[in-house]
Image (cartoon, rainbow, N blue to C red):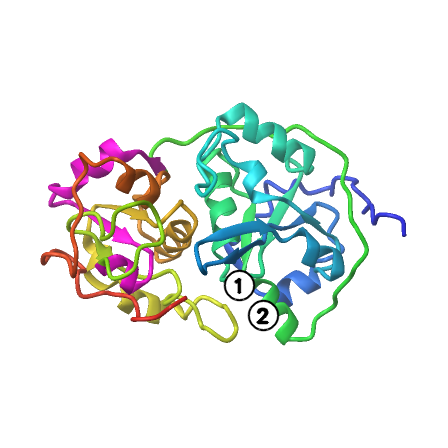
Amino acid sequence: MQPHTPNISVPAQSSRALRMAPLVEPAWLEAHLEDTDLRILDVTIQVKLRPFPRMRSGKREWKRAHIPGAVFADLRKLCDPHSPARTFTRPDADWFAAQMGQLDIGDHTRVVVYDARETMWAARLWWMLRAFGFDQAAVLNGGWTAWQLERRAVSSQPSSYPPTTFTRAPRRGLFVGKDEVLRAIDDPTACIVCALGRRQYRGERREYGRRRGHIPGACNVSAWRILDRRTQRYRPLDELRALFGPILDAERIITYCGGGVAAASDAFVLHLLGHPDVAVYDGGFIEWSADKRLPLEIGDARPRPGSAAAGPDDVE
C-alpha cells in the first residue's frame, strides 16, 4: 500500500492567519481532513502500570487504525534523548526543531495532536510546541476514544509528509526545574499542583521513584479527574473551573506529575481557563523523589489556596 501523501501546496491565506483554537472537536477535524496545511499527529504511548510502570510506543495500534492522514510521532523521541527513561524532559531547541521539521511542522502548517490514552500525551506535545513558540497547534478533545465512539472515518493507510524547517522561538517560563519548585513551596503567590492520583499524592502508593508522598503544600487535581472517563473529553469549562477552584487565584501555578505528562494535561486545562502564568515541572516526582535533600509530605497538604481540590481515590 502506498503512503498517503497529501497535496502540500500552501493555501492562499497563510496558516498563521488561520488561528487555531487550542482544543478542537472530532466533528471539526473530520470537516477539515482535506485542508492542505493541516498535519495530524498520533502521539500515543501505551502504559502498563502493574507490577511497575512500563511504556511503549503506540505505533503498533496506529498501523492498524488511525485518523485519516495522521502520522505517528513517538513522543519519547521528541523529548530529551538523554533524560531518564520514564521522564519526558523538554529537549534543547535545535533537537526539537529538527524532529518537528521531519514531520513537516513549520510556518505553513497547522497541527492537531491526539492520542488513545487520556489526552495527556497530546497535551504534552502541545505544551512543548507552545514552549518553542509554535501556536498553530490544537489538541483533539477526547482523542482516538471520542473519534471511535462517534464512528468517524478511520484508515490503516500510512501517511507521509516532506520535511520542512521548524522556526523555533523558545518562550521562557513554561517549564521549570526543581530549584524554582523549591522556591514556590514558601511563596504565597504561587500554587503547586500535583496531577497524579490521590493515592500517589497521599503517599499510599509508590510508583515513581524511591520515596512516597507529594511536594509540600501541593494541591491535588488529578489529570484523570479533569476528563469524562467514558469519552476521554475534557469536562466542560464550568466544571473545570469549579474543580480547580481557588487555585486559579494564584499568581503563578506549577504543575507536576511523575514524569511531565499528566502535569501537561493539567497545565493545558489551566490555559483553557485563561490563567496567564502556568508552568510544568519537567523533572516531576521522579527527579524530586530521587534527591533526598528535597522535602516530601505524606497525607493531605497543609491548608493553602485550592487544597480542597483533590483527585479521586482510584483513578488509574
Tell me: residue 136, above or below residue 179: below
Q: In which quarter of the image is residue 282?
A: top left
Counting residues from the start of the chain, the first of labels 2 and 1 encountered is 1
Q: How many marks?
A: 2
**Distance from Cα at disc 2 to Cα at disc 1:** 7 Å
Q: In which quarter of the image is the C terminus?
A: bottom left
Q: Is residue 196 magenta?
A: yes
Tell me: residue 102, above or below residue 56: above
Residue 279 in view in this figure: no
- Report the amino acid beneath label 2: Ala
Q: Residue at x 58, y 54 (%)?
A: 44
The residue where tag 2 is placed is 146
Of residues 185 and 208, which is closer to you in this image? Answer: 208
Question: Horizontally, is 231 left or right of 41 in the view?
Answer: left
- Report the amino acid beneath label 1: Asn
Residue 130 pos. (x, y %): 47, 40
Q: Residue at x 46, y 41 (%)?
A: 88
Residue 310 pos. (x, y %): 25, 65
**SS at badge 1:** loop
Question: Which numbered dot is residue 149?
Answer: none
Q: What stretch is highlighted in magenta?
A: 175-202
Q: Does the magenta stretch include residue 30?
A: no
The residue where tag 1 is placed is 141
Question: Horizontally, is 79 left or right of 263 in the view?
Answer: right
Tell me: residue 151, above or below residue 276: below
- Are dots 2 and 1 in contact, CB under 8 Å? yes
Residue 52 in view in this figure: yes
